[in-house]
Amino acid sequence: MQTDEIKIVTGENPTQNAGFEPNDRMIDYETSKNLSYADLVSIYKGLNVISEFYDVLAAATATPVGICAVSLGKTLYDAVTAVMDSNPVDFMSSTILLSNEVDSDLAKMLKETHIVVAPKFTKNAIEYFETHDVCYVTIKTALKDYKKYLSNQITETPLGTLTQTPNLSELDKDSFKVVTKIKPTVEQVEDAVFAWKVAKHVSSRAIVVAKDLKTTAISQGLQSASIEYALDYSCDRSKEAILAFDSNITLHDLNVAAQGRISLVILPSASKEIVENADKLNMSVITTGFTNLLY
């Protein structure tokens, strides 16, 4: 189904109507079924994060609320398995996005998924999805070019129309700094960069716990940055893991992270008190020099 044929038939709630209007900044994609308002929001949020990892094998799950889990792998199968392990409940009903071609073996893992989004599907994968009534969306625009299509964010309110340019921030080697005496390993730095890229696309007051290039917990959109919530979800998987904040933290947050056996924290900036206490706790801290709030 071409994009100009898509008709959104349902809004977020039964009391809301929805529509679809093509514009001049659309990526090229095709869908096997009509997509609802909520479907397109899920795909949009998922594409935002999967495009950060266009040059590796990556998988992510998303709902209209936000990102559920993200993982990289040596194979796409490994990435999907890790995402499933990270958040098995949401995996069964969320949209799953993949950075590379889906074959029939992988398709069999995804038959319970609500929507599968990828750059390409093999003929056998398509046949399997159609047999099992799975919606699949082919992203024909190269993921590496996806950010070029991002438009200004527009919010219509009774207070006026708000506009904002998209967040195209990238980590800068000049602002990316290890500020503690405890220096991270190469693997920890890779996990930190991964977690920071995920946190960029997670609703504000984001906390991302990650290890081995896989999220083990994502906390987002809460009234306060609830590090306890994220660590409780991550459970034993927080040992020696990385914790990313989209804003600054308190000494209480740092102590809770230490109790969860977090090995490194990455965040926009850190006060002298945070750095000194991190050293006492044998924890590394990396600062990026900018926030990634997403309300």
Image: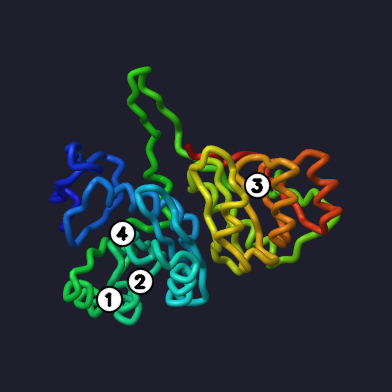
First reached walking from the N terminus: tag 2 or tag 4: 2
Question: Can you say which quadrant of the picture contains the N terminus?
Answer: bottom left
Residue that carries the numbered disc 2 in the rendered image: 101
Q: Residues within 10 Å of mark 4 (few under 14, many from 20)?
A: some
2 w.r.t. 155: above or below:
below
At 18% from the left and 37% from the top, the residue drawn is 15
Q: Residues within 10 Å of mark 3 (few under 14, many from 20)?
A: few
Q: Label 1 vs label 3: CA separation?
A: 38 Å
- In the picture of the structure, the residue carrying the numbered disc 3 is 172
Depth check: 21 or 61 in front? 61
Amino acid at dot 4: Ile
Q: Look at mark 4 in the image and give the residue it sits on.
A: 139
What is the secondary structure assignment of the residue under circle 3?
loop
Indicate whether 268 appears above or below 29: above
Extreme top residue here? 159
Per the model, the C-alpha gap separating discs 4 and 3 is 29 Å
Q: Check residue 201 in the rendering and tell me which mark sits there, or answer none.
A: none
**Residue at the spot 67% in from the left edge and 40% down from the top edge:** 248
